[in-house]
Image (cartoon, rainbow, N blue to C red):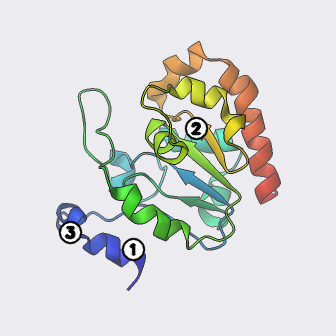
């Protein structure tokens, strides 16, 4: 039985499986870059295609890769903090369920021996992987991205909901994204 099958059959995911929903992730053994985000959005869950929305379009732009490299090259892996769309909250989506990353990420990461860079998108992934204090802001984490290299590269979520943050923090697109694109290009040799 595969890890995918184990995730589908996990009691914690029973309501999703019963509803005909399946976990969204991609872990090609050949991957060199791992993207860890929070959880699939509604459109992504409905289509079954990771980052298949406006956030994904912006993410690929930030990475400097096209859809074929992102989806078909085998060089990029994606593991969310939760494999299923968590539902709507008052503002945006609900957070990823607790315990998913602890249970499944080590098993999935072990299948990818060639990962050279892990991109941590958003506060949930950054707090988990960087062991950040609860009051650490995403702005300070992203500003200090170089502290986490060469293993991790933290970035803000590419959601259109973050347009206000991007306007308040122009340094991100001016300083951080070119460095991210350079690292991506060196690793996957675009």
**Mark 2 residue element:** helix
Q: Position of residue 184 (x, y in %)?
A: 74, 49
Label 1 or label 2, whichever lies nearer to me, is 1
The residue positioned farthest toward the bottom in the image shown: 1
Q: Is residue 31 left or right of residue 124?
A: right
Q: Check the image and report above or below for 189 versus 133.
A: below
Image-quadrant location for residue 60: top right
Question: In this figure, which residue is indicated by the disc labeled 2?
Answer: 58
Mark 2 → mark 3, Cα distance in angstroms: 34 Å
The residue positioned farthest toward the top in the image shown: 168
Q: Position of residue 92 (x, y in %)?
A: 32, 31
Marked residue nearer the N-terminal end (3 or 1): 1
- Residue at position x 75%, y 42% in the image: 181
Crowd around label 1: few <14 · some 14–19 · many ≥20 (10 Å): some
- Residue at position x 40%, y 56% in the image: 101
Marked residue nearer the N-terminal end (1 or 2): 1
Question: In this figure, which residue is indicated by the disc labeled 3?
Answer: 11
Q: Is residue 83 left or right of residue 112?
A: left
Pick the quarter of the image with the N terminus. bottom left
**Mark 1 residue element:** helix
Q: Position of residue 100 (x, y in %)?
A: 35, 57
Label 3 or label 1, whichever lies nearer to me, is 3
Identify the mark at residue 4; answer none if there is no mark.
1
Q: Check the image and report above or below for 157 versus 22.
A: above
Marked residue nearer the N-terminal end (2 or 3): 3
Residue closest to the eye, 28 or 110:
110
Q: Is residue 109 left or right of residue 46?
A: right
Label 2 or label 3, whichever lies nearer to me, is 3
């Amino acid at each position: 039985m595969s890890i995918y099958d184990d995730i589908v059959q996990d009691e914690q995911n029973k309501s999703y499986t019963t509803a005909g929903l399946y976990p969204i992730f991609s872990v090609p053994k050949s991957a060199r870059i791992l993207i860890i985000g929070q959880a699939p959005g509604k459109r992504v869950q409905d289509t079954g295609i990771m980052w298949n929305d406006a956030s994904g379009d912006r993410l690929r732009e930030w990475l400097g890769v096209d859809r074929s490299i992102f989806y078909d090259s085998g060089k990029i892996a994606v593991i969310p903090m939760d494999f299923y769309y968590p539902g709507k909250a008052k503002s945006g989506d609900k957070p990823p369920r607790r315990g998913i990353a602890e249970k499944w990420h080590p098993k999935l990461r072990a299948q990818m021996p060639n990962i050279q860079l892990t991109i941590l998108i958003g506060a949930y992934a950054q707090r988990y992987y960087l062991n950040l204090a609860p009051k650490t802001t995403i702005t300070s984490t992203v500003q200090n991205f170089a502290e986490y290299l060469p293993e991790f590269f933290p970035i803000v979520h590419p959601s259109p909901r973050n347009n206000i943050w991007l306007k308040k923090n122009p340094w991100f697109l001016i300083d951080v994204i070119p460095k991210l694109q350079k690292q991506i290009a060196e690793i996957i040799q675009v």
